[in-house]
Structure formats: structure tokens, C-alpha cells
Image (tube, rainbow, N blue to C red):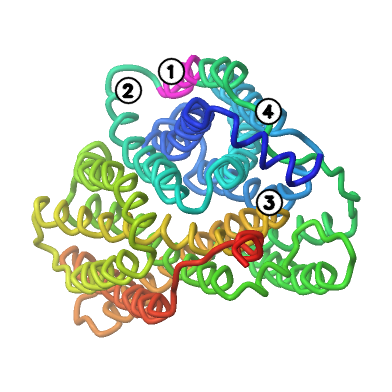
Amino acid sequence: MSNQTVGTETQNIRRGPITVALIIGAFVAILNETFLNIALADLMHTFNISATTVQWLATSYMLVIGILMPVTALLTGWFTTRQMFLGAMGLFLLGTIICGVAPSFGFLLVGRVVQAAGSGLLMPVMMNTILYIYPPEKRGAAMGLIGLVIMFAPALGPTLSGLIISALSWRWLFYLVMPLAVFSILFAAYFLKNVSEVTRPKVEIPSIVLSTIGFGGLVYGMGSGSEGGWLGPAFMIAGTVSLVLFVWRQLTIQNPILDLRAFKYPMFALATIILILVMMTLFSTMILLPLYMQKVMLLTSFGAGLVLLPGGLINGVLSPLMGKLFDKFGPRWLVIPGMIVMSIVIWLLSRLTSSENSLYIIILYAALLIGMAMVMMPVSTTGLNQLPKKMYPHGTAIMNTLQQVAGGIGTALFVGIMASGSQAYLSRSANPTASDQMLNALVSGMNRAFLISMLIAVASLLLSLFLKRTTAPEEEQAGE
């Protein structure tokens, strides 16, 4: 099937039902990522395990996605759109069933790994399909709908799971997701059409091995942190060496599994760097702010979820609107003001005290997610719009993979900065064991972490000054 044939077919398909099918699947999968966080204490009690052990439910999820995303470009070349999406949702449903009936922690962990395999395949399929079925001048609005799902689902997760756990057991977090996953599969089986070209590229085993060790080792090393002992740094070193070899191999073989030549397109390269930095700042907030609310403001997990909910709702409402504004005005009029708002909010977070009220945090978090809505999808769409069609799977795989790695780096970096800042405060204290001093030390550490996060946000702002509207090479040639 030629590119021209694919293009002709995509002009004749109904975009609306396909987009809805993708969004339903993504919402179910992404909602589940934050669903379990609030149940960790219950799981520790149920299975009689430590906090270090239960954290593997989150670490393994991130690890599997980090390993899978780089090879999604290869899988997209071997399987149709329907096969990829239905296979991903099938894996996710299977993992959800295993989790729901898990008799032991080991079974629960296996279920989460299977769930993560489905989620890791789902996001690249969704973004690739949007790129294929929408022309560049309409992609902003479609990407805005994806942005709604990506931000709204995680924001809803903690609040909704808090309500469920307060009335039912943690197993209902999986039982209630099962019918949603089944509905997504049935809906997609009827409405989703094949839009990508099956090229059956060569399966490059050495690249897959290097990618798995590289991204898997780096994400595991970052996720394990100091609790991993010597294994954390060892995995990071192995991951870094493997990544260097992986990059070298991708640039020297004829059919790479992840075509890094996408970085030859300047707006794609710039957009990817901005997204990496923005994801690091976002993760700093998502990790530190709930910790501040529970440890300093003494809110429950459910209460903290309620404080974060308005920001998530506002972001969800604004994302489609920002997509339409992007189609009309281009990236600069959205991204630059958005980065300014984010930088100001993170600066204010760096000045938190031990006596803030919930309303102030609600306002700051809502403002942060307004800025995020103005930045994330416009930057992604700007970068991907410059790529030729044959590079879409590689471009989305590169962006998703590096954002995942950036999340792992951001988590480890800002938690480490917070810990060192707290320790520095206590070392200067006359009574470091006093409860008020320990509380002030925690706030001081968070202030330092948010300050570093603000500097990264300012760097993102400076880079965003160079963004400009882009078009794919095929369209430039057609216009000549």
C-alpha cells in the first residue's frame, strides 16, 4: 500500500468515531495509572508487605512502558491499526482481570506488568492514528482532545479511587475498570479502521536488546533511587552504556527500529527538548505537591485528591480549546504565555511555608495546569507536523520514550534535591529531632526542589521563543 493510497483512504473514513474509540481506550488505561496510588497503604496491610515492596507496583509499570515504547515504531510497521489497538486493550483487560482476582502480591505485580504492556502500546497507536487521519491544519484540535484525556484521567484517578476505597475494597478499583475496557474493545472493533501502512520492516534483534537494556536500565535505576542500593547506580550505568550503543547503531544501520534521523528536522528536535524539560517540571509538582499536602497540611489522600481535582478538570476543559487556537494562531501565541504562567507558579511554589491553606494550593495548581494545557499538545503537534509520514511512528515513539525517561529522571532528581535540602536544614538546626524542625526541614527541602524546577521551566521558556509553525515535507513539495 503506497502513501498515496493511504492518504486517499484516510480522506474517505469517518474521523469522529475513530477518534472517540481511541479516546475511550486511552482514558481507561491512563485513569488506571493513578488509580492504585491511593490504595498502596491498604495493599501493604492486605499482603503484609513493606513500602519498598509495594512501590514495585509503580516502578514496574514505568519500567515496562519505558522498555516497550522504543519498539512501537517497529510494531506499527508489522501490525495494522486495529491489531495494535485491540491487542493493546486486550492486554490491558487481561492485566486488569489478573489484578482484580490476585491471591498474592506476586500475582498483583504480574497483572500490573501486563496492564503496563497494554498502556505502553496504546499511546503511540493513538498519536500515530491522529497524525494519519487529520491534516496538519486540523491536528491541533484533535491533539487537544488527547490532551484532555492525558491530564483529566490522572487528575480524576486519586479522587475517584478514594471514594471507591472508602466504600469498597481495593479490588473494586479493577472490577469497575473491567466493563470500561470491554466497552472500549467492542466500540473500537466496530468503528476503528486501519489507517497506517504495514511495511513489515526487518526485526533488528541487537537494537531491541540494546533498547531494552538501555531504557529499561535507566528507568529502573531512576525509579529505584537510593532504596535500590548499589543496584540502582549499576542499572543506570548499564542503561547509559547501552543507550550510547543503541544510538550509534540506529544511526549506522539501514533500517533502524527507532529512526533518530527525525532529529534532523529542527522543530521536532526543539519540541522534543522542550517536552523533556516540561515533563521534568510537571513530575516535580506531581510528586512534591501531594507530599506537601499530606505531610505538612495533614490532608488525607482523598482530601489531597480533591484539592488537585479542580486543576485537572480545568485542564481537561481547556485542552481542546487550546488545540483549536493552535490550529488558528500557531504555537508561539500559546506556548510562550503558557511557559510564563508555569514559571511564575513554580516560583510561588518555591516560597511555600508550613501554614498555607487549601484554597491557595487549588489556585496555584489550577494555574499550573492552565499553563500546561497551553504548552504540551501545541509543542508536540508543532514537532510532529514537520516530519514526513513515514517518520510518524518513529517521531511519536521518540517523544513518548523520552518523556517517560524524563519523568523517571525528574522524580529521582527532585526527590533527591528535597531530601538533601531537608538534611541541610536539619544540620543547621539546634534541635533537629524536634517535630517543628523536621516539618520546617521538609518544607525547606521542597522549596529548594521547586526552585530548581523553576530554573528548568525558565530554560523551557527561552527555548519556546524559537518555536514556529511547521509543515510536513510532502506539503511543502505539493505547494511548490
Q: Is residue 339 visible?
A: yes
Q: Residue at x 49, y 33 (%)?
A: 19
Place of residue 302 in the rendered image (x, y in percent of width and height, measured from the top left): 25, 36
Number of numbered labels in the structure image: 4
**Residues at marks 1 and 4, CA–CA distance in whole angstroms:** 25 Å
Q: Residue at x 74, y 39 (%)?
A: 5
For the residue labelled by badge 2, is the local secondary structure a helix, a strand or a loop?
A: helix
Report which residue position mark 1 lands on.
Answer: 176
Report which residue position mark 2 lands on.
Answer: 164
Q: Are marks 1 and 4 in contact (CB under 8 Å)?
A: no
User: Which mark is on residue 393?
Assistant: 3
Q: Residues within 10 Å of mark 1 (few under 14, many from 20)?
A: few
Q: Indicate the quadrant containing the C terminus: top left, top right, bottom left or bottom right.
A: bottom right
**Residues at marks 4 and 2, CA–CA distance in whole angstroms:** 33 Å
- Magenta residues span 170-180
Place of residue 247 in the rendered image (x, y in percent of width and height, measured from the top left): 77, 71
**Residues at marks 2 and 1, CA–CA distance in whole angstroms:** 10 Å
For the residue labelled by badge 3, is the local secondary structure a helix, a strand or a loop?
A: helix
Q: Earlier in the sequence, mark 1 or mark 3?
A: 1
Marks 2, 1: nearer the viewer: 1
Vertical side of 266 occupied by 436: above or below: above
Marks 3, 2: nearer the viewer: 3
